[in-house]
């Protein structure tokens, strides 16, 4: 499939010139099957995150049996193309294997060593190859309370601190992140994430950064760039690094004419990138995919939300040019 004339300066180079890593989440299937996917990924992006391959269930489907091969392929692609790797994710409430759910229900005491062994095995396998680990993902509920998950129910709120300590033990050189959604700007959930980080740091827990997922959209889902910058600043003031980790922008939440929404979407990308560039703490922006041909959003919303930078034919959209513009402009 032709990709048209490649833009003069790829996003990864524009980002590097500004001290910001620009990455994309990668899906193993098109990576293996689609040369255009590989070409655009390697040309435009300086970091990869596995959309699913590094999650607990895919990595350790049976107790003690690890399947690293799919994630290894993505890591190898990154290495071959001079890309960083974001590790996603060690502790989450979704995509866990059956045996973990069973332990959580019936053998709570055995869940601690199982979690520790998983963190150790995975971090040792990827030691020195992962630039940032999302150690704990989405531990805060939308109202700011601890999210009711199998981990919380079986282990209590202390599992978060333990996970970070074990991750640090397994790879003392790895930057460790807490990652969440819906806490990108200011508000009760962002306050709760900030409070959680303060609490972890007070306890001396090794945590080095926060991931703002940035699954956003037009209309009610549009983030206020000033609030995003302010949140980044207060996290930075704690000594934490901030990464935008999973950005995509849904079109269907908008209310304006459909024809105007790609331009509106581009403005959301541009302002969010500008917010990151305005804050010293923000050092990385990853999109949750890069082509509308492969996005989790349509299966989630049931709608054609076209949330990413390239269209299904790998042509750059207004959103792509807006990101390039933001990365090129002097803030
Ligand atoms: O993109 C991922 C999708 O393929 C999976 O089906 C889904 C399972 O819950 O997870 C998606 O990725 C999620 C990420 O790991 C954490 N933040 C929210 C992302 C979108 O759901």
Image: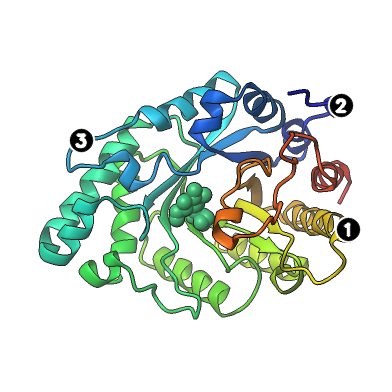
- Residue at position x 84%, y 61% from top? 258
Residues at badges 2 and 3 in contact (C-beta under 8 Å)? no
Which residue has dot 1 on it? 259
Tell me the residue that label 2 is attached to.
Answer: 8
Residue 240 location in percent, x, y? 55, 56
Q: How far is disc 2 from disc 3 in space, using C-alphas?
A: 46 Å
Residue 210 is at least partly visible in this image: no
Q: Is residue 40 above or below residue 289?
A: above
Total numbered badges shown on the rendered structure: 3
Classify residue 278 by image quadrant: bottom right
Alpha carbons under labels 1 and 3: distance apart: 50 Å
Single out the residue that lies furthest toward the top.
80
Depicted 97 relative to depicted 324: above or below: below
Using a 10 Å C-alpha cutoff, classify the residue at mark 3 as few (fewer than 14 neighbours), some (14 to 19) or many (20 or more).
Answer: few
Residue at image mark 3: 65
Q: Secondary structure at mark 2?
A: loop
């Amino acid at each position: 499939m032709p990709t048209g004339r490649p833009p003069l300066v790829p996003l990864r180079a524009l980002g590097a010139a500004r001290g910001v890593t620009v990455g994309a989440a990668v899906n193993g299937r098109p990576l293996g099957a689609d040369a255009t996917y590989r070409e655009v990924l390697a040309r435009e992006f300086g970091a990869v995150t596995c959309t699913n391959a590094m999650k607990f269930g895919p990595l350790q489907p049976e107790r003690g049996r690890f399947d690293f091969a799919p994630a290894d392929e993505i890591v190898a692609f990154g290495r071959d193309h001079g890309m960083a790797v974001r590790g996603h994710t060690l502790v989450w409430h979704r995509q866990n294997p059956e045996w973990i759910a069973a332990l959580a229900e019936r053998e709570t005491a055995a869940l601690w060593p199982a979690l520790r062994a998983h963190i150790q095995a995975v971090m040792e396998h990827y030691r020195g190859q992962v630039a940032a680990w999302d150690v704990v993902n989405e531990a805060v509920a939308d109202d700011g309370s601890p999210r009711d998950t199998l981990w919380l129910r079986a282990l209590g709120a202390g599992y978060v601190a333990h996970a970070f300590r074990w991750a640090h033990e397994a790879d003392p050189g790895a930057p460790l992140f807490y990652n969440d959604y819906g806490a990108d700007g200011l508000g009760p959930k962002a306050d709760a994430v900030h409070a959680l980080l303060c609490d972890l740091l007070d306890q001396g827990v090794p945590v080095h950064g926060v991931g703002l997922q940035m699954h956003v959209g037009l209309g009610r889902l549009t983030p206020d760039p000033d609030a995003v910058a302010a949140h980044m600043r207060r996290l930075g003031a704690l000594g934490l690094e901030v990464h935008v980790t999973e950005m995509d922008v849904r079109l269907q939440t908008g209310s304006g004419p459909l024809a105007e929404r790609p331009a509106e979407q581009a403005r959301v990308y541009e302002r969010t990138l500008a917010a990151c560039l305005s804050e010293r703490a923000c050092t990385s922006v990853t999109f949750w995919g890069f082509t509308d041909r492969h996005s989790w959003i349509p299966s989630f919303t049931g709608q054609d939300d076209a949330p990413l930078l390239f269209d299904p034919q790998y042509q750059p959209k207004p959103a792509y040019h807006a990101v390039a513009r933001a990365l090129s402009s002097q803030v």
